[in-house]
Image (spheres, grey):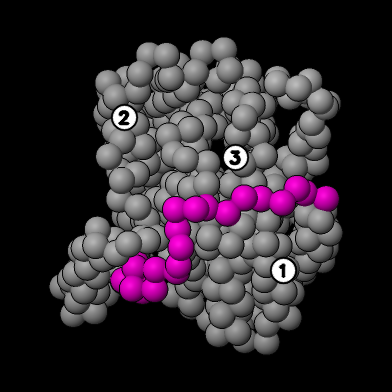
Amino acid sequence: MIFNNTNKLPVQEPAYGWTILVTSLAFVVAQLDVSIVNIALPQIADTYKVDISVLQWIIDGYTLAFAVLMLSAGNLSDLFGAKHLFQIGMLVFGVASVACGLATSSVFLIAARVLQGVGAAMMIPSSLAILNQTFADTPGRRAKAVGLWTAAGSAAIAAGPIIGGILIKLSDWRFIFFINAPLCLAGILLTFQLKKQSKTTLVKKFDLPGQFTWMMSITLLIAAVIEWPKLGITHPLIYGSILLGGISFIMFLVIENKVSFPMLPLTLFHSATFNVLLLLGAVLNGFYYGTVFILSLYLQDILQYPPLTAGLAFLPLTAGFVISNLLSGNIINRYGIRIPILIGLIIFALGFAGLFISGMHTSFWELSIPFLLISLGMGLAVPAMTNGILSSVDKTLSGTASAALNTVRQAAGAIGVAVFGAIAAGGGSAILHTITVSVTAAIMCTLLIIFLTQKHLKKNV
């Protein structure tokens, strides 16, 4: 119970734990499906008798829909209320998950995966908007809430291969999708206890031209990156998609600059803090997703780990995320966002440097140290980054701001997997070479981000 300062009357305090539980549940199911499917790909290929290109779209159909629609969903969250969109997203995701488990063909499965991405895109910005609006007047509690929310999602994405391996060993690959249904149903029921969320007064109508040009640009550009390894950069579909995607993106910027109620107010980018934190999100996700994808191949193809053992090898990643995310709220409250971002990025870079030891006979224990450091560093930096994004905008635009951040992160993750996957396509020594390339690039980009964050983030932030 808290009191109003003017008349000392008691005011209802937000249900802290309940709000975090509901919003984190959505983040868990969305992040889990980013990584859990990878471990089941051999079984899926055997079921449908398909090649690797079809398997790639089973993975990327989800990520692409997630990235393409995130910003649109953030706009809808601010326009119609975060709670309503959150409930719809949970319902869509649950239905789509059941459809994935029942899929009778690879085409059916890809379509259901795309629908899952639609549901995830609705859930993530609206869940973060619920947190921001609920605790907007208590920044300390918001920092802790975002840390717990991030911890849940980070642990889920790191635990995906482990859970997938266990489910496949105990039953069938279809159960990696069926498990989402009861979680989504529980999430929908729990939302009825949440307080009503405010709607923005800055957005009056849906920006249809902006939505269309944005989806065109991001779809074409990411699809070009995904298909480039197979078709080559000189293929008409690749350079044509890049050209048309670039034109669509320019049109999107022009539209957003001229319309009265843009889906992405370009004034957000007037803030150097906002821009640097978006770039930080891209670097972290791009190298994390891309490198973990390569490490999955390394563990199974080079070190000859079976799927379940390879999944268990990622346990240090899960532990690091949980530990650092749980600590991040108190650290942010005490030091602001600048210090935890600096410390987190240094640890992140040291973790990647540790991967230089990867060879033909590297032991699990040698790998566990860099795995732990990467997740510890990322787990410190991401909650601080998220808090910085939320605090840099009006709370009624928190859905749009969080959607912009997560769109950049998802797109960067998809690009990281596509680029490093292309380099490692030859297998064997190519995988080891790709680890070296990814580690070197990650360290260089992290050092650049350290410089930019320390330059543009105020010392007391």
Q: Give the percent coordinates (x, y) of residue 145.
A: 66, 33
- Residue drawn at x 83%, y 50% is 193
Q: Disc 1 or disc 2, which is closer to the eye?
A: 1
- Residue drawn at x 56%, y 66% is 117
Mark 2 belongs to which amino acid?
Ile
Question: Label 1, label 2: how many angstroms apart (C-alpha)?
Answer: 38 Å
Residue 390 versus residue 369: which sits nearer the camera?
Answer: 390
Mark 2 surroundings within 10 Å by alpha-carbon count, few (fewer than 14), some (14 through 19), many (20 or more): many
- Sooner in the amino-acid sequence: mark 1 or mark 3: 1
- Residue drawn at x 37%, y 61% is 261
Which residue is outermost to the front? Answer: 7
Relative to 217, say whether 330 is above or below: above
Q: Mark 3 = which residue?
A: 132
- Residue drawn at x 76%, y 36% is 14
Is residue 270 at least partly visible in the picture?
yes
Is residue 28 at least partly visible in the picture?
no
Q: Mark 1 = which residue?
A: 91
Q: Mark 2 = which residue?
A: 449
